[in-house]
């Protein structure tokens, strides 16, 4: 078969049109399908928490949600997160009355008279996921470590239960699980955040007093919050590189 | 209702996870026992390195005492771990930034490279001679202990002596390392102001020397009494003198720490001060500083300043030694337990309730304190520390 130049162009043109149309159909079809969720890239995140004291009402939802989500023992000596109530009389910053009945799990019964001249507020506590974590430093086998996304995690299958990390944490965030004899603490609900979900405490906070943010994501609202608010970390003198930022933190809180 | 606060007699506010104490009486034993090891070894080194001939009768005894206690030293740690079966990971995958991860290496170095080797070199001649003079299983046992060596010529013994001396010289910084290191484990915890001081390793070290000397002094006098042997008075007088000097330094350091804390009065001071005046009053002020330090120091000072009769000196030394051991145990208690009684919020206090017949209770603690003496008794039978003296006593008769 011989083709002259005119026929060659006509045939090639037809093929070109058919191929382009087919490609368009396939492309349209695929675009219509649900896209596969992108796998969690651990190095692409750097997690931090915002705790807004102005918004915390001490309802204890976060404590209950955390214990339920993470199977934390229900006794009053084991908490991944808890809430403290501060009652500070005027200028007496050194002697605040602090209580945390059952870690705030059951909420806070009325204790102080209204208008007693003191300021009363709630402080949610959890692992500060420090960048220079003293607990990570002291672990003799590296069973607790900072993940590349900035979350301090514990490998329970490796932990000796020596409790040095419990001693080293300045914030009292660690406990020994009496069932496994290994250490346990907040992991920002790692099983959830790596799937694009919120930690249980954040999800269940009715006032939005708890927020999680990805400092490596430029579009994360955490950047706007940190720009617009004066925040503080707990015990800054410990120089732990804490990533739990408190808005409205009173100087009496320790 | 916060029931845990009632159960644990919490006063003020503690972070909820702090209410239960993490480190028990077993962790009190750990620095106490390693301290005895380091102290006993340093006493032994006096004779070897510094040629203090007067303390020679206790040289071998001090080494055996150090070994007996060193063998027991890791047991309270092991018993305390939530997963003792995983402790091997500290050797296999040590976390290099952890002070605790180094324990296994410091311990093994001290046990194998220093203590066992030094004892073996010092006893080699005796072991070979015993093997030669014995029959049956005893012969086999001592041949195994001799590790196949049979050469006890003068040249070989001179080499033993030189190597032994070299090891002792390495051993002194190693003993300092062992116990200074134990102090560092506590002193480097910045979260805990009761522990966090660079003085901690030094205070631990000197209290270790005091306790080790006191122990060897007491063991020597007790064995002499039990065996009806004459106590070598120049020897115990010399030991008591070192005991006194080391104790003075130890006390000065502890007072320096105390005065510094009181004068500086940082954010933790009120909380710690309250604790010392309440929950730690008996163990710190009465037992550690009063009975355990000032009384024995006064007794020892008296023996140095006044010419006392031999029986009076023996009595004073025994009382001072026993009280010093009690005081230094109290010091370890006040560091380890005291450091966990107050909240890191400085707003409250908890209590330590020691269990009895549990894994971390009083019973295993007592057993762990008795065990080294059982081991020591065994070691004394196996490697008699006074064999040389006996021969020396017999030798002139034979010559005559």
Image (cartoon, coloured by chain):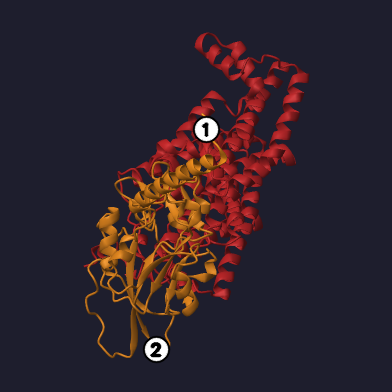
Chain colours: A orange, B red
Q: In which quarter of the image is the C terminus of chain A?
A: bottom left
The image quadrant of residue B252 is bottom right
x 54%, y 45%: residue:
B95
Percent position (x, y) of residue A2? Answer: 54, 31
Residue where numbered disc 2 is placed:
A90
Q: How far apart are marks 1 and 2 (CA)?
A: 74 Å
Where does residue B24 sit, x and y in percent of width and height? 39, 51
Give the side of residue A241 with respect to residue B22, left or right. Answer: right
Image coordinates of residue A42 in percent, x first then y, are: 47, 52
**Could you tell me how many numbered marks the image carries?**
2
Parent chain of label 2: A
The residue sitting at 55% across, 66% down in the picture is A239
Where is residue A247 drawn, in percent x and y? Answer: 42, 76
Q: Is any atom of residue B323 visible in this view?
A: no
Q: Quadrant of residue B112?
A: top right
**Do we see residue B346 in this rendering?**
yes
Residue hosting label 1: B228
* Label placed on residue A150: none
Taking the image as shown, residue A129 lies to the left or right of residue A177, namely: right
Q: In this view, does A6 lie above or below A238?
A: above
View extreme (top): residue:
B136
């Amino acid at each position: 078969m011989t083709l002259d130049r005119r026929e060659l162009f006509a045939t090639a043109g037809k093929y070109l049109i058919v191929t382009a149309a087919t490609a368009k159909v396939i492309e349209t079809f695929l675009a219509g399908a649900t896209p596969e969720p992108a796998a969690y890239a651990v190095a692409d995140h750097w997690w931090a928490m915002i705790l807004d004291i102005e918004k915390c009402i001490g309802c204890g939802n976060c404590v209950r949600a955390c214990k339920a989500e993470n199977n934390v023992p229900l006794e009053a000596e084991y908490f991944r997160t808890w809430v403290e109530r501060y009652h500070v009389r005027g200028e007496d910053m050194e002697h605040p009355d602090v209580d945390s009945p059952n870690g705030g799990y059951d909420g806070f019964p009325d204790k102080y008279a209204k208008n007693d001249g003191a300021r009363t507020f709630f402080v949610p506590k959890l692992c500060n996921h420090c960048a220079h974590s003293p607990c990570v430093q002291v672990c003799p086998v590296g069973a607790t470590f900072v993940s590349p996304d900035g979350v301090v995690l514990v490998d329970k299958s490796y932990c000796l239960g020596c409790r040095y990390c419990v001693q080293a944490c300045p914030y009292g965030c660690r406990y020994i699980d009496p069932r496994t004899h290994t250490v346990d603490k907040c992991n920002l609900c790692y099983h959830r955040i790596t799937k694009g979900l919120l930690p249980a405490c954040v999800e269940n906070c009715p006032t939005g007093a708890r927020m999680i943010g990805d400092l490596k994501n430029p579009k994360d609202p955490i950047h706007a919050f940190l720009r617009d608010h004066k925040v503080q970390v707990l015990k800054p003198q410990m120089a732990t590189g804490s990533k739990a930022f408190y808005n409205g933190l009173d100087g009496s809180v320790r | 209702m916060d029931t845990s606060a009632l159960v644990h007699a919490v006063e003020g506010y503690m972070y909820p996870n702090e209410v239960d104490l993490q480190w028990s009486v077993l962790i009190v034993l750990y620095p106490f026992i390693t301290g005895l090891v380091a102290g006993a070894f340093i006493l032994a080194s006096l004779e070897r390195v510094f040629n203090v001939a007067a303390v020679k009768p206790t040289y071998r005894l001090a080494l055996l005492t150090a070994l007996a206690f060193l063998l027991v030293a890791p047991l309270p740690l092991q018993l305390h771990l939530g997963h003792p079966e995983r402790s091997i990971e500290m050797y296999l995958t040590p976390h290099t930034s952890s002070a605790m991860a180094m324990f296994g290496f410091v311990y093994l170095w001290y046990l194998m490279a220093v203590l066992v080797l030094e004892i073996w070199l010092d006893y080699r001649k005796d072991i070979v001679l015993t093997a030669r003079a014995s029959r049956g299983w005893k012969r086999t046992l001592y041949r195994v202990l001799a590790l196949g060596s049979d050469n006890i010529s003068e040249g070989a013994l001179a080499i033993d002596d030189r190597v032994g001396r070299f090891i002792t010289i390495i051993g002194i910084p190693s003993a300092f390392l062992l116990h200074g290191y134990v102090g560092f484990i506590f002193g480097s915890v910045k979260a805990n102001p009761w522990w966090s001081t660079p003085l901690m390793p030094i205070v631990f070290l000197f209290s270790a020397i005091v306790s080790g000397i006191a122990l060897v002094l007491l063991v020597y006098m007790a064995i002499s009494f039990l065996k009806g042997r004459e106590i070598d008075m120049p020897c115990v007088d010399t030991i008591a003198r070192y005991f006194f000097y080391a104790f003075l330094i130890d006390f000065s350091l502890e007072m320096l720490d105390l005065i510094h804390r009181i004068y500086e009065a940082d954010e933790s001071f009120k909380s710690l001060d309250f604790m010392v005046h309440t929950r730690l009053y008996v163990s710190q002020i009465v037992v550690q500083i009063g009975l355990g330090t000032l009384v024995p120091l006064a007794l020892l000072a008296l023996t140095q300043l006044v010419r006392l009769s031999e029986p009076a000196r023996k009595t004073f030394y025994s009382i001072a030694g026993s009280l010093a051991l009690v005081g230094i145990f109290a010091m370890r208690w006040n560091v380890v337990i005291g450091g966990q009684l107050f909240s890191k919020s400085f707003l409250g206090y908890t209590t330590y309730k020691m269990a009895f017949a549990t894994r971390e209770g009083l019973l295993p603690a007592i057993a762990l304190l008795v065990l080294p003496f059982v081991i020591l008794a065994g070691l004394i039978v196996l490697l008699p520390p006074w064999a040389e003296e006996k021969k020396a006593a017999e030798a002139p008769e034979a010559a005559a």
